[in-house]
Each structure stands twice: as C-alpha cells, then as structure tokens.
Image (cartoon, rainbow, N blue to C red):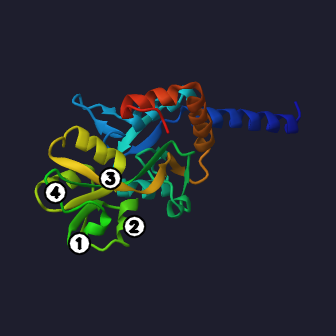
Amino acid sequence: MSKCIKTLLFAILFAAVSLGTVQAKQLIVGVDANFRPFEFKNEKGEFTGFDVQLFDAIAEDLGLDYKWQTMDFNGIIPALQSKSIDAAIAGITIKSAREEVVDFSHPYYDSGLVLLVRADNEDIKTIDDLKDKVVVTKTATTSVDFLKSVETEDVKLLPNTDNLFMELLTGGADAVFFDSPPLMYYAQNQGKGKVKVVGPLYQGQPYGIAFPQGSELREKVNITLLKMMEDGRYAELYKKWFGTEPK
C-alpha cells in the first residue's frame, strides 16, 4: 500500500473518530431555574416548564445528550461567550447587543414587558405613574434598558423573580416591571389576590435559544424547532403551559 493511500486512510479514520467524539459529547445547557412558567423546579426538585420541555423535545429529536447548568440570568451570555456552556434557554430576548456576541435560534415565543403592583394599589396604572415610585426589576434584562427612559424615584435590581415578588409584597418597591409571562403566571397562581398586572404590554420582544458564536448546533435546533411548529408538537406544548393557541 502506498504511503499516500495510508495517509488518506488515516485521515478518514481520524475524522470519523473526531465526529463520533463530538456526537457523544454531553452538552451543557444553561438555564435560569427561577423563571416560571418557562423554567423552575417542581415539588420533586425536578426541572420543568415550557422552556425545559421544549428543549427536551428538541434534544430527543436530535439524539442529544445534555445536562442542565443552573445560573443567574446575568451569567448566561458571558458563559456562552467563554463557551463554558453549549447552549442556553431561559426566556432570553433576542436583541442586537446580544446578537453581536452570541448566536440565536429562530424566535420561539413573543413576549413583552408589564407592570405588577400590589392588589390594593390604585395609584399605578401605566409607566407614567412611576415618577415618585420605587420600581424593581431583574438584573441584566431588557427591562433594565427600558426603565432608563422612564422617570422613577428609584430602580432596584435583583437577581431573580422570587426576589422581585418578595420586594413588592414587603413594601420595598411599589411596582415590578419585567417580562409579562412570569408576572402574569405569578398573579394567577402564587400571588393570586395579593398582586395584579396593570397597564398595557410594553416593547414586544421575541425569545430565542442562545449558542456560542459559530455553534454547529444552532442550525440543527432551528430545523427541529420549525418541524415542531409544523407538526403540532409546539402548539400542544404551548397550550399546556399558557392555556391558549400560539399567536
């Protein structure tokens, strides 16, 4: 056998082994474990929620082996940039500043920002009523950027949604301003009778699954996500968690 043929066969064998290694790799998927109803731990300590079950379905379709990596939301983008995680799904709004440093899937959910106040509050109807009020929101989110253009007495930044609700209920803030799904879910469930959502939906915004730049996983996830939207699996999951058909 000539030296040239031996070299070629070795190269093919090496490529096959490398491909198998990549496919066998256990992926690390970043998630914020405190963002109902998208991701949270149930009474058994298991991860569940719309995001969790959506990614479970995508991973099953693609035959992916993965594990969840919980982290504060403000650590997700840096973790993707450093490639210490392979993907992240955590109600992440697709915006230009993030698109510059990470890659996103196709949008999978349309959200927006709303106000949450205590049930007995009659002073706050819209963001125009926040001039002499203390507002609390989640660190490193689009709501922080939005509030920079809103006149308030003070804006408090906290790391997770449970902190936001506690700050409101204990009187540390007059209103929560944040993504509509977790605020509406809380008002209809754990906070029922204690809080209410007021005003319109501000700054419509899409959520996407995020990846390190150049990730080969992105295109595969996009194709599976589109398949799920076409064959009804996405709609079924959406209705399970939000009670309505996808818009």
Residue that mark 4 sits on: 121
Residue at the image point whose x is 53% and y is 49% from the top: 211
Residue at the image point whose x is 23% and y is 61% from the top: 124
Characterize the local packing of mark 2: few (<14), some (14-19) or many (20 or more) Cα atoms within 10 angstroms: few
Characterize the local packing of mark 1: few (<14), some (14-19) or many (20 or more) Cα atoms within 10 angstroms: some
Point out which mark residue 73 bears: none
Residue that mark 1 sits on: 154
Q: Residue furthest left?
A: 170
Point out which mark residue 145 bears: 2
Q: How far apart are the two marked residues, 4 and 1, measured between alpha carbons?
A: 18 Å
Q: How far apart are the two marked residues, 2 and 1, measured between alpha carbons?
A: 14 Å
Question: In the rendering, at what x and y percent does residue 80 appear?
Answer: 48, 53
Question: In the rendering, at what x and y percent does residue 11 appear?
Answer: 75, 38
Task: Say what secondary structure mark 3 lies in.
Answer: loop
Q: How far apart are the two marked residues, 4 and 3, measured between alpha carbons?
A: 30 Å
Characterize the local packing of mark 4: few (<14), some (14-19) or many (20 or more) Cα atoms within 10 angstroms: some
| Circle nearer the N terminus (4, 3) | 3
> Is residue 170 visible from the viewing direction of this image?
yes
What kind of residue is marked 2?
A: Asp
Task: Say what secondary structure mark 4 lies in.
Answer: loop
19 sits left or right of 162 in the view: right
